[in-house]
Structure formats: structure tokens, C-alpha cells
Image (tube, helix red, strand yellow):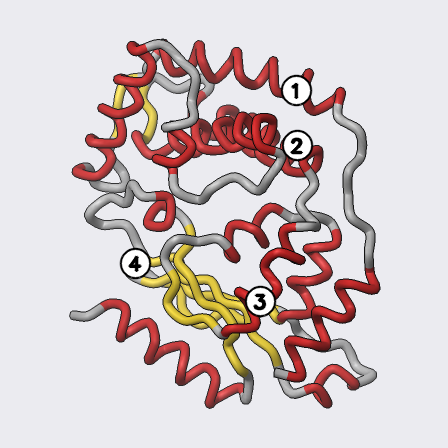
Amino acid sequence: MDIKNEILKKLNACESEHNIRILHAVESGSRAWGFASPDSDYDVRFIYAHDMEWYLKLEKTRDVMELELNDVYDINGWDIQKLFRLLHDSNPTVFEWIHSPIVYNTQPIIAEITPQIDSFFSCKAGLYHYLNTAKANFKGYIANKDKVKLKKYFYLLRPLMACDWILAHKTPPPVLFDSLLNEMETDDKLFTTICDLIDRKQKADEAELIARIPVLEEYIASEISSIKVSADMLKNDKNNDWELLNSLFLKCLER
């Protein structure tokens, strides 16, 4: 089965059924990060727009769309209006969708406005988002357990590496795990441990359990502590330019 063609068929059918236009459709999650397991599902995320008149309704309108959720596909999307509202808050998910390395379909307007989208990235907000993600994942998936799902370590490593990228580059972090790993300043033992874990992840089932890895957890604890200090010291750097967001929104609708 050609998975990409199947996904495009589902997206095309969604456009016809709901009278929308999909502006950007990408892969999210482990496949976009570059370390999918053989049985990983397809986390498809898309951005869509209605006709301009649709946004003039007085009643509240739904701004998300769920197409499918099963063992193979997890497909859902955001209305372009929701995307820009979240962009105003520098929601990191926006940047991950925009910069995903696996693109199923995209319209030229997205590439055209990506520099303006990136101008809304807040280093402080990004740091707190990824830091809190790592802390919550450690508490939920690692702490007080004898064995853990192999993939859960990546749910801590990737957000912490994203924080390091933000501190070093002041830009949205890359989606690919390898891009973050190659920037990592660490000793050979930890680097080798992570590389070995990637290799195991790409061969293992999603549910595979492993013994806890002390060298990783020492790194994770140290990173959480130091990143918290750095995040607290940063000044608020949010871009609050609603006028620019309104103009980008209208430009998307006009296209």
C-alpha cells in the first residue's frame, strides 16, 4: 500500500465533504522526528481554511477537525484562524507543523508566510513548553517504575534537546531528532547511549519495555534543573502584533 497516496485520498475527500481547502498537511510525532518503530501509526496534521464568508457567522464555529483515529492513522487538523490565534501565544506546535520534514501537501502561501510565522517564536515560551513537557513525561512515564517503554525516553530527550537549541540559536528547534542530537554537547558515553537507543527504537515495537537507564536519567535531571534557571532569567519576548496576524489570515483566505 502506498501510504502517502492513501493519506492524500483521505485529505482530498475531507476537502470535498467539508468544502474546505487544506493549506498544509504534514507528519507529526515519531515519523517526523526520525525514529519511528515498525508499527508506529501515521500522525497526520493539517491546516485548513473555509471560504471567507464562513468566518462572518455570528454563531460559534468549530475550529478543529478529526478525520480518523485507529491503529494506522491519527489524522486531525486546525482551522487557519485557530493556528494564528495560537501563533499569537507562540504555541510551539505551530512551528513543529510548519517545519515538519515530512510534507504530504502544501500550498505556496505557507512557504511565503513562514518567515512572518517564525517571527512570533518566543524563546521564553518555547523553553517553558518543552521543559514542562519533559517534566510531565518523566513523572508520567519514568518515575516510580522498574521498567519503562523504550519510546518514552525520547519524550524526555527531544524536548530537552529542543530547549538547548533554543538557548543556543534563539529560533524554533528543528523537528528531526538527529538535527538536535548533532548539536548536543555531551560526553561520548551519553552520545553512544542515545544512538544505541535510537537504533533499538527503530527496530522495536511501540510497546517494548526496557530497564531504566541511569546515565540518561542523570542527564535528564541535570538538564531540567539548568534549563529552568535559564528560562526564568529570560525576558518576555512574545510578539503581540495582532495587525500582522490579521493580515496573514486575510492573505491566506484571499488565496
Circle 2 residue = 128
Circle 3 residue = 112
Q: In the image, which is nearer the foreground, mark 1 or mark 4?
A: 1
- Position of the N terminus, as image quadrant, is bottom left
The residue under label 3 is which amino acid type? Glu
Badge 4 local density, few (<14 within 10 Å), some, or many (20+)? Answer: few
Q: Residue at x 46, y 19 (%)?
A: 143
Badge 2 local density, few (<14 within 10 Å), some, or many (20+)? Answer: some
Q: Is residue 171 above or below residue 16?
A: above
- Position of the C terminus, as image quadrant, is bottom right
Badge 1 local density, few (<14 within 10 Å), some, or many (20+)? Answer: some
Q: Alpha-carbon distance for marks 1 and 4?
A: 36 Å
x and y percentages locating residue 219 in the rendered image:
45, 13
Q: Residue at x 59, y 54 (%)?
A: 94
Local secondary structure at mark 2: helix
The residue under label 4 is which amino acid type? Asp
Q: Is residue 239 left or right of residue 145?
A: right
Q: Alpha-carbon distance for marks 3 and 2?
A: 29 Å
Point out the tag, 4 or 2, that comes first from the N-terminus: 4
Q: Residue at x 66, y 74 (%)?
A: 62
